[in-house]
Amino acid sequence: MTLLTALAQETANAPDSGLAGWTVQLMDDLGLFGAALAVSLDNFFPPIPSEIILPLAGFAASQGTFSLAGALIATTVGSVFGACVLYWLGAIFGRERAVWIFDKTPLLKVSDLERTEAWFAKHGGKAVFFGRMVPIFRSLISIPAGVERMSFTAFFLLTAAGSAIWNSIFVVAGYRLGENWDDVEPYASLFQKLVIGAVLVVICVFVVVRVRQLPRRRRA
């Protein structure tokens, strides 16, 4: 039994099951690489929330599993690695396939893609930087950046900067809270729910507007 697992069993608020328990075991087994791996998976599986994993990395650092600086570096490397993989998947997917999907998908238009491209050309840098601090969007924003072939150097630096800021907030919070690391979770969960709710509202409004436009488009 490793140090963090032993401490987890002795501490009332320490993780011992579910996602938190799995993350503890991963960091126990793989150390900093485990912390980086857990955070990188957030890019591919948004249901794995980094807002839980990051305070756990801080908790592990507070228990001496690794250093605070190591936790900050490892989690940022994990975030950037996952984002870069999605960037290159977007680049491989390419604009031509995106045009085909927009042309063939009901309720979507190629002009929607063109407007998105124009917006991304103007605001893409800010979207990538601030998108790293928003649940759901931090996973999605890397794909259009790749499709639009945003400068990889700019994408890398903006992703690293945004990830470092966001990760530091939660890792340091977990480090300072120690065994009370889970005090962070209710606030992070509320923020995530607000973002998801806003996205759902936007999608519903978009669908309603497009459905109402269908008879007009058919007559045209």
Image (cartoon, rainbow, N blue to C red):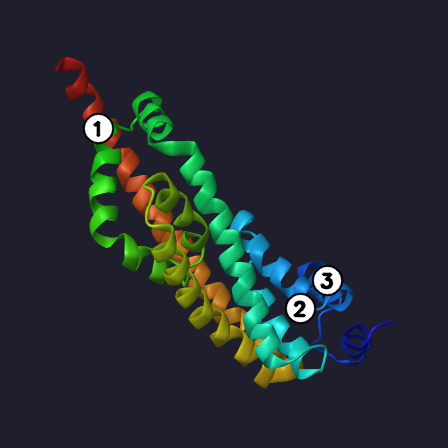
The one nearer the camera, 200 or 173, is 173
Counting other residues with Cα less than 10 Å from the Cα at mark 3, is it few (<14), some (14-19), or many (20 or more)?
some
The one nearer the camera, 92 or 213, is 92
The furthest residue to the front: 153
Question: Residue type at mark 2?
Answer: Leu
Residue located beneath label 3 in the image: 26
Residue 2 visible? The answer is yes
Counting other residues with Cα less than 10 Å from the Cα at mark 1, is it few (<14), some (14-19), or many (20 or more)?
few
Q: CA distance from mark 1 to mark 2?
A: 53 Å
**x, y percentage for residue 115?**
20, 39
Q: Earlier in the sequence, mark 1 or mark 2?
A: 2
Q: Earlier in the sequence, mark 3 or mark 1?
A: 3
Local secondary structure at mark 2: helix
Q: CA distance from mark 2 to mark 3?
A: 9 Å
Residue 65, located in which quarter of the rendered image?
A: bottom right
Q: Residue at x 82, y 76 (%)?
A: 6
The one nearer the camera, 47 or 146, is 146
86 relative to 2, above or below: above
Question: Residue type at mark 1?
Answer: Arg
Q: Residue at x 55, y 71 (%)?
A: 73
Residue 103, located in which quarter of the rendered image?
A: top left
Give the position of the N terminus as an image quadrant: bottom right
**x, y percentage for residue 190?**
46, 65
Select label 2 or label 3 by which is in front.
2
Local secondary structure at mark 3: helix
Residue located beneath label 2 in the image: 32
Residue 212, numbered label? 1
Label 2–label 3 contact, CB within 8 A: no
